[in-house]
Amino acid sequence: MIPVLVAGAGPTGLTAAALLAARGVRSLVVDPHPGVHPLPRAVHLDDEVMRILQAAGVAEEFAAISRPAPGMRLLDGELRTIAEFRRDDGMGHSGWPQANMFDQPDLEALLRAGLARRPEVELRPGTEVVHIDQDGRGPVRVRLREVAGGRQEEVRAHALLGCDGANSRTRHHVGARMRDLRFAERWLVVDVRCAQPLGVWDGVHQVCDPARPATFMRIGPERYRWEFRVRPGEVVGREALARLISPWTRGVPEEDLLVLRQAVYTFRSQVADRWRRGRVFLLGDAAHLTPPFIGQGMGAGLRDAANLAWKLALVLAEGGHERLLDTYQAERAPHVTHMIRTAIAVGRVMTGPVGAARLLLRQAEHLPAAANSRSPRLRRGPLVRPRRPWGDLAGTLPPQPWVTVDGMPRRLDDVLGDSFAVLTLTPLDPLLAALARRLRARVLDLRATPIDDGTLERWLLGARAAAVLLRPDRVVLAAAPLASGTAAIARAAAAWLPLLPASRTTPTTAERNVTA
């Protein structure tokens, strides 16, 4: 019996396996391709998603092969700037550059190399899922086939993660339908290698021109990407392509521009209506598709992996309640739908009249993911407990400064580890202290032992919070207001503690006495 079978060895599947391995959960990862897909696809990750790569153990290596981008500009048809959204190339809120450009095959190779160092993971390339069956909630019976030889075998798993892309076989088993968010356009995607610098602004260029909306960006030292909306019936040949990219390549001989890929894709906006059937789950493109205008496609899949991995580990390894897994779609589907709608909004700005773009830009809230790299908070639910209906810190990520513990500077998430954590400005009330012990939470009293430059204290005080309880994926589960002390978190725990393993929910006799 395999604890987890991961169908698909793209970034989402590889990251899910790495996050499970970090929690001691074994997995088998299968993929029909014999190795890393060679073509460049996704090219951008933000600082929040970098924290997921950090948890997966490859962030430092990824930082060495990616480059920070200074932001995004909206341009008119004459390439004049309408608006500019800057990105911090140092430490953003999450402790990494806010915009990171990269080549997807490089990231996949890093993730595979990282898994090769983990005995909990077996990667089996050249193997595809051909049939899925399950009774109730498990086990899941999966028939695998070697692509080259055709040999088949049946394996059983406690859970199957369908990270098998837009044409997902897993989605068919789940019985999910893709809900259309009403954006589908054909775009030409062109990747070019050029040793000579093009001499243009180094960020992302979004051209807002109804006649020819376009995107341009530098990916790496010699790598560039263009995207152009294709007109009905249009075929872009060599000469037409040279004309399209000429505003950015003036002065560069044509022979110095090596076209790595030129293909037409349909940018879609869809979200699956169900992400789970028993112990079979959908992640990444199997669950949602987004236009690329805010660079959140791959990041959405990695967010799926981070949200599900710790919950699945608690269920499989410690006996957590099955209802814990119900929170996966409940949290992720609204979040990714919000991000897709934001991408659509940017796409509408690009394809509408320039006057309409300027009007929309006066209302910055319409483009939250363009104006900054923060994603929306998770909605209220069993594992997101705001103290006010309109929310506080619950459902958000804390900042990640460098902190000093035992005389060593480290990133906050590395200090907190992979379990629950409490950040507090005051000694814990006995109720919260008892809860933290049961959760095996790392407790950091920020005033008793200052560990950073005050970033965490300012963050808490800015929300008038005395303490926060963080989930293993670093999302704030609940906050205690300054006025009422830290016990407020523990008093509200009855709403979500039953989802966790009994070893983390059953109070000791001494704790019952404190409660009494």
Image (cartoon, rainbow, N blue to C red):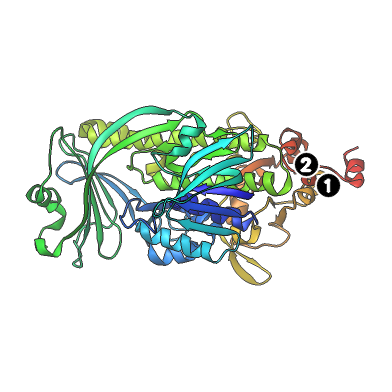
Q: Residue at x 47, y 61 (%)?
A: 112
Q: Could you say where residue 339 lies in the image, as x and y percent from the top left?
A: 42, 37
Mark 1 burial class by Cα count in 10 Å: few <14, some 14-19, many 20+: some
For this view, does 200 lie left or right of residue 451? Answer: left
Q: Residue at x 14, y 44 (%)?
A: 78
- From this viewpoint, is residue 397 visible? no
Q: Please tell me whether residue 178 is drawn above or below residue 67 in the rendered image.
A: above
SS of the residue at dot 2? helix
Q: Could you say where residue 158 lies in the image, as x and y percent from the top left?
A: 63, 44
Circle 1/circle 2 CB separation < 8 Å: yes
Q: CA distance from mark 1 to mark 2?
A: 8 Å
Where is mark 2, residue-wise? Answer: 487
Q: Please tell me whether residue 36 is drawn above or below residue 304 in the rendered image.
A: below
Residue kind at label 1, given as amino acid type: Pro
Residue 284, by quadrant, is top left
Q: Residue at x 14, y 65 (%)?
A: 256
What is the number of the mark on residue 430? Answer: 1
